[in-house]
Image (cartoon, rainbow, N blue to C red):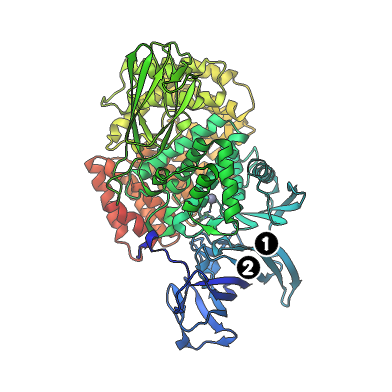
């Protein structure tokens, strides 16, 4: 496998100004004809015209001609990955015909079939599986597309842009021609052909243009589309109001398909979505699913400006579009839902997945320096840490300054393929800033640690001493300081807000933003309070690990009274984390008592929103506890986690029962709190409360309650549970997405026999290894949702994962590689588990025809 380095970037010597494609879809294969208008890139100053090298993969080349003359075999060379044409001029037309086999394409990249329809996935490098091309994002071309297919089987023939003409052909076939006026890279190309239902609506843009909106789904699913359509309309409105960005085509189409490697794809004018992020009604989708649909619909829509109109010069710049678009979808969700709850959910992802990635063998900066397989770099680092970096810019510049930077970015770069550096420059120039140091967030991997100490100097004078450091990551032994915005407030011993004054100011304030730029810095403040408890890194103002030696009573005070909702939640997490990660084998009685009392007090707080209550009493995720540790005794951690959950369930059993019975609202936040209460009751005594859960499952009129009940039942030790698992199956067996939930609910059980059960589920008639949602529903749900049994000391969990990776390597390398990353934390574990995992990694590495995708992950993990 070859490694590609960012430092080796060179502009392409050729451009493709126009791309004309003709697809002839047949039952066994597809013929793709392309006509490419190619010109020398004016940026290329060399006098020598090099051979034209096009990318291509798994293609059968049928014909090649240049300027109308068919080339003989010695005038070009076709290898496994490339088509090379030796003698070309500065401007010419290249015609190609290739034959491809979409029905056999299980990688879900390029052109493939899903549920009887044709669809495409071209990002990152899938277009080369459709035809030979300069398959790199800086090559922006105007596309015309003609699709021909059987009219009865494929009444709909869709591509990007606007439809031009359509008509019937002989033999029951028909065609449609499309034109996309916006030059675009090949990764944004899309084609869909099938027989689908459509929900239509429209949106009038801020300049008064009417845009037709079309949402295509499998037949019979129209009653699950309204929410997605409304989310699209909300997103269009929000982007106009918040960023002044108007949609540019007259048509916006979304197609939902069952077989999809990721969540969705922002192809120009024709988004292709995983059904999971489109289909939702109250009966089939949970409140969390609705949030997911709203977020992903918005994310893909926002890409129209941040990604499509302004795209990436090369794939190392992926965070330019993904980090920025995640930030935009987060801001949207914060406006649509509760801001604090959204922030907590965002930070949970960073702490549970991104910190782990940053401390493992695949650690990379948000702008990576190298890759073997680009698909492996669609990561929480590029996406979510990328969004945190943009959020820091927003924090540093404020709403208006950030908007000015965005406006300048669009003004300068509309229609271009650019770099992260271009984005930073736009932000700097619009705000007269010099952000030389800020760029370290783009260059350096790893999670910085910020240690803070508070010293009272007497007479109301206090010093906050800050020290930052960042551990070594692969290929980066030493790190330069980061620019770290730390939002700070204080409360006093009674839990009231403690106002303060900075030493260089007369203004008294309740909060300040301290921006670290050096390894060690001090902030001096003055306050009338004798005792100050600092509330640090409010709203998680930077993606760092903050270390302050709080004692338990300080954390309990912050948990009870921090006015910053995020930090209030975080104090509870820190309190539990401290107890779960200390060196004791069991949690002491006094510690259990502190937690119980803190929870009881918080649950009784009538001012607090039910979602925040629910979030506050959920224990820290085991993955984030592992993610933040350098070495971990997992047996001890699992036992203490079980002990704590049981104690909170039992010692507050009456409180949970009362919350369950008196929280009567019909809002997602009410359901959330009620279901957390039910879960704790079942943990306390599942025999006694089983009936309650069973009744909830049977009587629920919404999927949130029905599934929560099923989950807690499936996780119980009660003998009747299989009746309810079967009842759910009988009711929902024809709803694919609900079946995914049914699978996932069964793999969380903390019992040794679970691995046998997971294996049985892999052989269930509703399971398919070719469908990524099913793989995620069973395997990913087990590995990430049931860490105690995944890490079962027998190694059976590791073997199960390796078996699945090996099976998938031959079918869908991208999904196989994603699963391989689940081993990445292995060096933190004890020697015995390390040996078991190493054995599995070596077994995978020895597989014949190992894909580049899996090789890259396994090789880095073993090194
Ligand atoms: N930009 C999209 C990325 C994507 C993707 C990448 C590799 C393989 C399959 C894929 N499907 C979608 C999704 C997004 O971030 O909006
Ligand atoms: Zn995206």
Relative to 216, 64 lies left or right: left
Vertical position of residue 166 compared to residue 405: above or below: below
Q: In what element is the residue under mark 2? A: strand
Vertical position of residue 157 compared to residue 448: above or below: below
Q: Do the residues bearing badges 2 and 1 touch, measured as CB atoms within 8 Å?
A: yes
Q: Quadrant of residue 370?
A: bottom left
Pinpoint residue 443: horizontal percent, then vertical percent.
Answer: 38, 49
Pinpoint residue 352: horizontal percent, then vertical percent.
Answer: 41, 38
Considering depth in this image, is 483 or 645 the residue closer to the camera? 483
Q: Quadrant of residue 20?
A: bottom right
Vertical position of residue 587 compared to residue 108: above or below: above
Q: In what element is the residue under mark 1? A: loop
Tell me if residue 717 can be seen: yes
The residue wearing badge 2 is 143
Q: Whole-Å distance between the Cαs marked 2 and 1? A: 9 Å
Tell me if residue 329 can be seen: no
The numbered dot on residue 454 is: none
The residue wearing badge 1 is 161
What's the residue at 70%, 48% (across, down)? 222
Pinpoint residue 431: horizontal percent, then vertical percent.
Answer: 53, 42
């Amino acid at each position: 496998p070859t490694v590609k380095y960012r430092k080796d970037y060179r502009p392409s010597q050729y451009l493709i100004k126009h791309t004309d494609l003709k697809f002839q879809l047949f039952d066994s294969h597809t013929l793709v004809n392309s006509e490419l208008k190619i010109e020398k890139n004016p940026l290329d100053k060399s006098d020598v015209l090099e051979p034209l090298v096009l990318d291509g993969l798994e293609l059968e080349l049928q014909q090649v001609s240049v300027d109308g003359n068919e080339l003989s075999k010695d005038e070009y060379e076709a290898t496994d990955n490339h088509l090379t044409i030796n003698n070309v001029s500065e401007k010419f037309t290249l015609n190609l015909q290739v034959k491809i086999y979409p029905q056999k394409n299980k990688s879900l990249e390029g052109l493939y079939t899903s549920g009887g329809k044709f669809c495409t996935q071209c990002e990152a490098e899938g277009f080369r599986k459709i035809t030979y091309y300069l398959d790199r994002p800086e090559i922006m071309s105007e596309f015309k597309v003609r699709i021909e297919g059987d009219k009865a089987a494929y009444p709909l023939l869709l591509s990007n842009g606007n439809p031009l003409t359509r008509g019937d052909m002989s033999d029951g076939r028909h065609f449609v021609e499309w034109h996309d006026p916006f030059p675009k890279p090949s990764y944004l190309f899309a084609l869909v052909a099938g027989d689908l239902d459509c929900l239509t609506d429209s949106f009038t843009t801020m300049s008064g243009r009417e845009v037709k909106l079309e949402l295509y789904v499998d037949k019979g699913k129209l009653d699950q589309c309204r929410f997605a359509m409304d989310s699209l309309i909300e997103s269009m409105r929000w982007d106009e109001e918040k960023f002044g960005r108007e949609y540019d085509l007259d048509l916006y189409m979304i197609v939902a398909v069952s077989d999809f490697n990721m969540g969705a794809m922002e192809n120009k004018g024709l988004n292709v979505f995983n059904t999971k992020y489109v289909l939702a009604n109250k009966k089939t989708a949970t409140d969390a699913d609705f949030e997911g649909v709203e977020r992903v619909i918005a994310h893909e829509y926002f890409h129209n400006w941040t990604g499509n109109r302004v795209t990436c010069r090369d794939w190392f710049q992926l965070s330019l579009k993904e980090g920025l678009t995640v930030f935009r979808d987060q801001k949207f969700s914060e406006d649509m839902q509760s801001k604090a709850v959204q922030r907590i959910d965002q930070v949970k992802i960073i702490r549970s997945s991104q910190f782990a990635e940053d401390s493992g063998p695949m650690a990379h900066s948000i702008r990576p320096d190298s890759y073997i397989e680009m698909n492996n770099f669609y990561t929480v680092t590029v996406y979510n840490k990328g969004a945190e970096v943009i959020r820091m810019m927003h924090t540093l510049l404020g709403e208006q300054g950030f908007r000015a930077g965005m406006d300048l970015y669009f003004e300068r770069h509309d229609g271009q393929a650019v770099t992260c550096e271009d984005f930073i420059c736009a932000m700097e120039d619009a705000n007269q800033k010099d952000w030389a140091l800020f760029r370290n967030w783009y260059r350096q991997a790893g999670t910085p640690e910020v240690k803070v100490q508070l010293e009272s100097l007497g007479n109301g004078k206090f010093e906050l001493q800050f020290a930052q450091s960042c551990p070594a990551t692969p290929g980066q032994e030493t790190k330069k300081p980061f620019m770290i915005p730390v939002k700070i407030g204080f409360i006093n011993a009674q839990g009231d807000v403690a106002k303060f004054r900075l030493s260089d100011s007369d203004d008294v304030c309740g909060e300040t933003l301290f921006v670290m730029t050096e390894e060690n810095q001090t902030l001096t403040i003055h306050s009338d309070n004798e005792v100050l408890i600092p509330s640090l890194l409010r709203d998680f103002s930077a993606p760092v690990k903050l270390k302050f030696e709080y004692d338990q009573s300080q954390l309990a005070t912050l948990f009870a009274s921090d006015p910053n909702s995020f930090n209030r939640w975080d104090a509870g997490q820190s309190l539990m984390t401290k107890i779960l990660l200390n060196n004791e084998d069991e949690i002491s009685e006094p510690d259990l008592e502190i937690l119980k009392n803190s929870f009881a007090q918080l649950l009784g707080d009538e001012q607090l929103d039910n979602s925040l209550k629910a979030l506050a009493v959920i224990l820290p995720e085991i993955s984030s506890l592992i993610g933040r540790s350098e070495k971990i005794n997992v047996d001890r951690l699992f036992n203490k986690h079980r002990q704590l959950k049981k104690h909170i369930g039992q010692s507050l059993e009456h409180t949970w029962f009362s919350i369950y019975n008196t929280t009567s609202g019909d809002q997602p936040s009410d359901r959330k709190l009620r279901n957390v209460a039910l879960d704790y009751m079942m943990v306390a005594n599942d025999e006694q409360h089983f009936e309650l859960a069973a009744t909830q499952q049977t009587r629920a009129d919404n999927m949130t309650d029905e599934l929560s009940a099923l989950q807690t039942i499936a996780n119980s030790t009660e003998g009747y549970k299989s009746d309810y698992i079967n009842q759910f199956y009988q009711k929902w067996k024809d709803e694919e997405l609900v079946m995914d939930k049914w699978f996932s609910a069964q793999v969380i059980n903390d019992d040794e026999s679970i691995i046998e059960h997971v294996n049985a589920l892999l052989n269930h008639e509703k399971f398919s290894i070719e469908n990524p949602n099913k793989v995620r529903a069973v395997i990913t749900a087990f590995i990430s949702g049931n860490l105690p049994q995944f890490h079962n000391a027998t190694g059976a969990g590791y073997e199960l994962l390796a078996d699945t990776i090996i099976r998938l390597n031959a079918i869908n390398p991208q999904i196989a590689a994603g699963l391989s990353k689940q081993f990445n934390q292995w060096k933190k574990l004890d020697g015995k588990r390390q040996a078991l995992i190493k054995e599995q990694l070596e077994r995978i590495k020895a597989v014949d025809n190992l894909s580049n995708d899996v090789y890259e992950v396994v090789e880095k993990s073993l090194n």
